[in-house]
Amino acid sequence: MSNDLLNEATGALKELGDAPANASELTRARVMRDLHREHRRRVSRTLILVPAAAILLGATAAAATTGGLSGAWRAVVSVVSGERIGGDEVTTSSTATPDVRRTAGAETNPALPADTAAPTEPAPEPAASAAEESTEPSEPVAEPAPVAEKPTSAGEQGISPQGQARPSAPAATGAASQTAADGALSEAEALELSLYRKAHQAHFNAHDYGAALVAWNDYIQRAPRGRFAAEAQYNRGICLVRLGRSAEAERALRPFAEGRYGEYRRDEAKRLIEALRGDAASTAPSPGN
Amino acid sequence: MTLSKVEMSLAVGQLGRNEDSLMERLARGEASAVGEVYDQHHQSVRAFARRLVGDEASAEDLVHDVFVSLPRAAQGFRGGSALRTFLISIAVNHARHHVRSAARRRKAMDRFALEPTDESSTPEQAARKIELARALSRALDKLSVEHRVAFVLCDVEERSSREAAEIAGVPEGTVRTRLHHARKKLRALLEKEGIR
C-alpha cells in the first residue's frame, strides 16, 4: 500500500505546483519595489558616509598638521577603553581641548569596542564603498523619450533603465517611499503597475501588438519616469516591428542601439535595425522594373 | 514585406538571450535584469516553491526572496549550471524560514478546518488529490529541510539525483541517502495518518 499511496500523494503534490498562480504579477511588483528601495538605501548611505569620511579625514589631517592629533587620539582611546585621562595629558592643543575635556570625564561606552580603529582607518572603507557605488547605475538617468537628452551616466557600465519612480526631487521620492514603508503600494505606484500589467498582458500573453502598442504608449505618457519606462520604450519598438511599421520601429529602437540605455537591449536593437534595413532593401523595387 | 530576417532577430533576441551578459547585469544590480529573469523563470521557481512549502502564500514569499536576493547571489555565481538551476538553489537556501511559516499556517488551517476550493469537475477525485497533497505536506513538515528538499527535488519534481545534488550543494550520494530516509519516513507518516 505504502508505495502506491506515497506515489499517489507525490503526484498530487506535483499538481499543486503546476496549478496556475494568480500572484505572479504582484510578486514581481514587490520584487522590483524592494530592489529599488534597497538601491535607494545604498545611495543614501553613501551620500552620508562619504561626506562624513571626508570631514573626518580633513579633521584628522588638520589635527596632524597642528600637532593636536596625538592628544586627540589619546582622548579617543581613553574614551574607548574607559580610562580617565588627566587634564595635563590632553590639553596639548587648543583645537583638541574642548572635546578632550568633555570626553575626559565620560563614562565608558559599552557599545564601543576596546580596539576601535584609528581615525585614519575608516577612510578607505567609505571611499571603497563610494567607488563601488559609483559604478552602480544612478537612479534618475534614463530618459524615456528617445529624442530627449542623453542620460548623464551614459559612460558608466550599467545604466539602470529604471527611471525615477517619481518626477519630483529625490528627497521627496525618498520621503514618499518612506511613508509607504508599511508595504502598501502608493496610488501612483499602483497606477503605474496597472498600466504596465495591461501592456504586458496584451504584448506577451495575448500577442495583440496593436493593443499592446496603445498600452505601452499609455504607460510612457502617464509614467514617463516609471520603473519600467525603458522596457516600455523597447517593447513599444517591438510592437512597431511586429506591425510592420519599420520606419517608426527603427526610430524607437535607435536609442537602444546607440547605447543611450547602456548595454540594455543594445545588441538586440542593433540586430533588429539591421534586419529592418535589410528587409527594406530586399523589397525595394529594382531599377529595371 | 517578408519578415524572415526580422523574425529571426526577434527570436534570437527573445529566446537566445546571452545568459552570461545577463548574469553580469544581475551582478551589477540592474533591476531590469532581475525583471527579465523573473519573466523567464518565475513559473518554475514558483512551482518548486509551492511543492516545497505546500502553501501558496509562503511560496510567493519564497519566490520574492529568491529574486530580491538574486543580484547579490549572482556576484558569487561561477557558471557551470543553468540559470534556472541556480535560481532553484537560491530557493533551497532561503527555504527554511518559509517551510516553518507554512507549517505553522497549515496547523492553524487544520485547526479551523478550512475547506479547500474545489475546482475540479470530479469532486471526489479533486477532494482526494487535495487530501493527499495536504497529508503529504503535513508529513513533509516532520522532515528536516534537507530531507524535504531532496524528496521534492527528486520525487516531486523528478530531477536526477545529480541535478538535485548540484542544487542542494551536496554530493550525489548524500542526496540519495536523504531521499531514501525521506521516503521511508513519509510512508510511515502517511500510514499513521490513516490515509487509504
Image: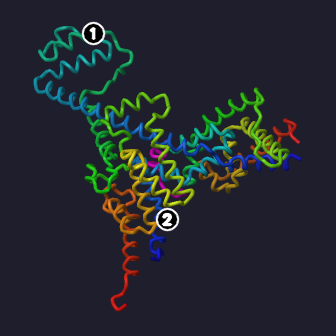
Give the class, few, some or many, for how many residues have Cα within 10 Å of label 2's Cα (few <14, many ≥20). Answer: few
Q: CA distance from mark 2 to mark 1?
A: 69 Å
Left or right relative to A202: residue B177: right
Indicate the secondary structure of the residue bearing disc 1: loop
Counting from the top left corner in percent of width and height, residue B184 is at 80, 44
Colour pattern: rainbow
* Image-based side of B52 in relation to A283, left or right: right
Tell how many labels: 2
Query: In this figure, which residue is indicated by the disc labeled 1?
Result: A84
Residue A181 belongs to magenta span: no
Query: Which residue is nearer to you in this view: A238 or A35?
Result: A238
Q: Residue at x 69, y 37 (%)?
A: B144
Quadrant in the picture for the C terminus of chain B: top right
Coordinates of residue A143 in the picture (x, y in percent): 31, 50
Residue at 65%, 40% in the rendered image: B56
State left or right for residue B164 relative to residue B194. left
Residue closest to the eye, A2 or B107: B107
Q: Which residues are magenta?
A: B68-83
